[in-house]
Amino acid sequence: QVQLVESGGGLVQPGGSLRLSCAASGFTFSSAFMRWYRQAPGKERELVAIISSAGGGTNYADSVKGRFTISRDNAKSTVYLQMNRLKPEDTAVYYCNAGIYWGQGTQVTVSS
């Protein structure tokens, strides 16, 4: 069955960095566009970043452009989200997505 397993979340101070990983299995990862979403308390889930199947195309929410980078390793069936210059408003549960499939989420908290 399809599995998306996120890791790498945690507590970080403003201005810090985190790298999220999402290990995928159960489908042809190299053919899939992959996305990272996030959901803050009391807010709707929002799309953060998307990467094409081969990794050549990426797009970002305006709120994270220049700070976050999405990448993938098709040999490892893993997608990453490098998050730099983190802000308190980046606090949310971050989810990996492949079409109709979702991971369980990983909590990112940015606080001093």
Image (tube, grey):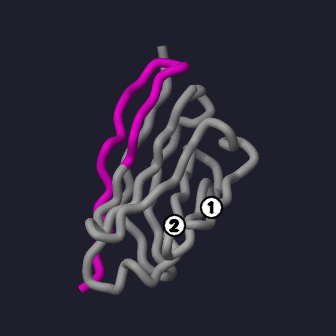
Tell me what residue is drawn at x 49 percent, y 73 percent.
54
Tell me what residue is drawn at x 47 percent, y 69 percent.
97
- Give the class, few, some or many, for how many residues have Cα within 10 Å of label 1's Cα (few <14, many ≥20): some
Q: Is residue 4 magenta?
A: yes
Q: Which stretch is magenta?
A: 1-20
**Mark identifier at residue 28:** none
Label 2 amino acid? Gly
Q: Which residue is mark 2?
A: 55
Quarter of the picture containing the N terminus is: bottom left
Relative image position of residue 103 (x, y in whole percent): 37, 65
Q: Are marks 1 and 2 in contact (CB under 8 Å)?
A: yes
Describe residue 11's horizontal placement relative to residue 62 as left or right: left
Describe residue 28's horizontal placement relative to residue 76 as left or right: right
Tell me what residue is drawn at x 53 percent, y 31 percent.
84
Distance between the alpha carbons at the discs numbered 1 and 2: 7 Å
Spot the residue most to the top.
112
Q: Which residue is mark 1?
A: 58
* Disc 2 element: loop
* Disc 1 element: strand
Spot the residue most to the right.
62
Tell me what residue is drawn at x 47 percent, y 42 percent.
82
Relative image position of residue 65 (x, y in whole percent): 69, 43
